[in-house]
Image (cartoon, rainbow, N blue to C red):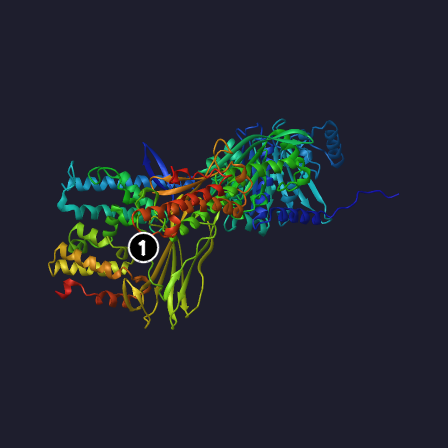
Amino acid sequence: MVNFPQPINRENALKAILDGYESCIDNEWWLAEAFQKDAIQNCWDARTNDKGKGWRAEIKYIANEDLLVVEDSGTTGLTGEIPEDYADLIRILQEADERDCGTEEKISSFLSSDWSGKSRSSLGSRGRGKMLFVASSDQKRFSFETLQYDSGQYIFGNVYLDKTKQVLNEYHCGNEGRSEQGRQYKSAFMPISKPGTRIIIPRPTKLLKRSLFDSDGITLIELIQKTWWEILCKCNANIIVDVGNSLQSVPKSPWLPVREAGVSIVHDSTNIPIKSQHGLLRIKRISLGYLGEKEIPKGYTGISIQRDGMSVQRLQTKEFIDDIRVAAKVFGSIELDSDLSLIMKNAEGPEHCSFKWNAVPHEFRRSVEREIKQFLQKHGLLEGDHAKVAKKQRATESRIENYLNDLSKKLKLPTSGSGHKIKPREQESRGPDKPLRLSMASFDGGQRVDWGQQLRNAFVEPVNETNSAILVLVKLYIFHGDRLVKEYEQRINLLPSQYKLVGWPSINIERAKFSKGKYILRGRLIALEDSDIKTEIAGEIKRIKKADRIYEISKPFYVEEDPPSVGLFRVERTQYPTPTERHIWLDTDVVSEGYVLRYNGLHPELLSVIEHEDMLFDHVIKSALQYVYALCLEADLNRVKNKEKPVIFTDCNLVADRQIELWKLLNLMNNKRSLDLSTHNPKR
Amino acid sequence: MAIAFKENGSRIYRSGTGIITDDEKNQADKLFNSIEKGMNAVERTLSSKGLLSERSRVVNNALYIWYEVGSKLNKIAVTYKILGTQDEVLYWQSIYDHVSPKLHSGTVPKNSMSRRKNHFYLCALMATYPWETVLEVGSWSIWRDIFDNRHVLEDDRVQQWVVRKVKHWVTNEKLGHKAIRKFLYKLSNELRYMETKVLSHKELRQKLEAIKFEIETS
């Protein structure tokens, strides 16, 4: 019988490990990110106290020796029994497994693969980090030194891929180790003299060096800040980087924690319960921030899931929010309590960059989604259901107002404050249609737009009703007061009868850019050439010359407030305490000398239609028209009394008997409604 | 970046872009200190020359005073690269926090929120011209009238043409403020329906020279 361990091509395994990191991290500086993450997590796991007091980790590149070094102090070093040979190593590992105390045998875990001695609560517990170090060297090797905290024993060794594609260990202890270290690295540094560990990677690969030193847009320090912001903030962790002949202490991240980032729109929730098959777990804290107009820097997008001080994975907010523009501006972090942290650790991928979500309680993601949505709705960044309904109602109210105000102009209804005196209707100031002009349609959705919504149809249409083409510039501006918020321009060779829209199909109304208030969309038509076309400019008919501002048009819109009412009628929803008592009624508005048509949103007849725009419109208009009829009747009666001609009714309809009949008819029509015509009934 | 303001005894930060990071706050603090130092220095210099009294500035040296103030503010704005940014209008608004009653007394004028009407912006604009030119144009009130025209502020070429014209009439023709005001009013009317920026330099000069001003025809 022949009996031997199955050979494993470790070189392929190394490539697979690197591929795993690359696909998990998925950005151009993946190798630097993986390297610093694994290196620092090994150092952090070995700290002598929870808060990391006295702890230090350093990443240094020694250019003249082409060595990349990771060194820690204030740590335990690689403690445990030092194996004498392979068989001894297996014995130590097996005994540690039986005793479930792998954390005590750090040196043995270090010298093995996928047999990590780290506790389930420590960060790197699969052993991939060491393989990453081997793969990071062109020579496929790395050296290590450690001084054990408890025994004071010094060990120096090498881990390397040999010709048979196996990963081999060799090491020396005590003075023999120091001598060997001196032989290999004497010109670079002395052996370590304080408890800790030093990893030395000779001839780091070009890919690693480029990723560490030449990355355009993100530096090693920024990568460390992004991953380790929590320990940098909470423990003042001392991480040093020396990769360009200058020693730099990694400062705290400017972006996390959110509450210290200077973001004005923030949210903090603590102790969020998560029901799971493992019992009641808790999210310790969710911190969210909304960045508004600025871009979230690379690496900070999404919500970082923290585990034991390290950022493992960032949940992208667009997974929870449909509006990807808003989602792209949300960032933050999730900290877990110890029990949930353990569950998540077991679900963590070997690269420590992702989670197997089928092993994570479903309630976790649901809770995160709930918190994100509540945060965005609270700040008007996301339309809630209530806001959607309110918006529809306001749009319908605007429609009703416009309808009634147009009608009142046609019917020449007087204002409410004129008493029996009829005010002459103001002449409409409408100039002649100009052959060259701009046309502006109504905004889709009304003049009011709220944060998180879009202003649609912000267009002008240049019109040429002459016989000649003309080169023009169409300029479009949005002003808030005299502050220019947005502008756009387009040169057009405007042909006769050509119609072309210029402007913005939609504009996102972001809170950071659009504060509450009135805005003006203004369009200008400017001649870019002298022309024989004549048109009215500045009140004179003249030939168009280059730079002449041929036409100007503007229209207001309102952010987070209703536009002021411009006609005789205003429509308002009211909530009457006794739902059946009032339905739809008309009040006078003493200030504007107009009328307010009120509808009781709680009335049973309105409840059934209130969420349907067209049905609400029809329902309210039916009652409103009866009021308009009554007002017309009163107005004409007053005209007759003042010996003027009535506008709507004929003289014979207005004789006393017929009046009473008309009022009776009106009251009959409104028999079932609380339509109060008593103030308009001349019989009183 | 951000701009720091004094409010109720403490410092608050505003930015044209919304969010303010720690770095931006630090930069805003440096700017705040520079403005404070700069304005104190200007006031000390002017006071030592007897141009500013405890009660109010000396009226007949207003041109020089505002020129000095404007020059200092321009230097600071250039150093901190504020001009043309979304925070520029905030910068001009914040100057009121740094001047003593000798230079400005009372509350901050409401219209100073607009750059066009901000007194310190206009001082700085005037200070972009050499002192000799500023003197030749005449008084501070003439400069104010020159800048009280949207086209003059929006198009540098119009501004420079107007300054040259006014300089000529004041220095060579010895015309007074009333006549200059008439010219500026006429110019404002002529340019009201013109978009000067679409014109080339030559075209613009031709249009401006073609305007028949009462001054030239009389």
Looking at the rendered image, the quarter that the N terminus of chain B falls into is top left
Along the line of sight, which residue is nearer the eye, A248 or A372?
Answer: A372
Q: Where is residue A626 in the image (x, y as percent from the top left)?
A: 45, 45
Residue to which mark 1 is pinned: A427
Q: In this view, does A490 lie to the left or right of B189?
A: right
Q: Is residue A675 left or right of residue B51?
A: right
Residue B186: horizontal and vertical position, in percent? 20, 60
Residue B21 showing in the rendered view? yes
- Numbered marks: total: 1
The residue furthest front is A657
Measured as percent of width and height from the top left, residue A318 is found at: 57, 45
Give the structural element (helix, strand or loop) at label 1.
loop
Taking depth in this image into account, of B134 and A598 the one nearest to the observer is: A598
Nearer to me, B183 or A240: B183
Furthest-right residue in view? A1
Picture quadrant of residue B25: top left
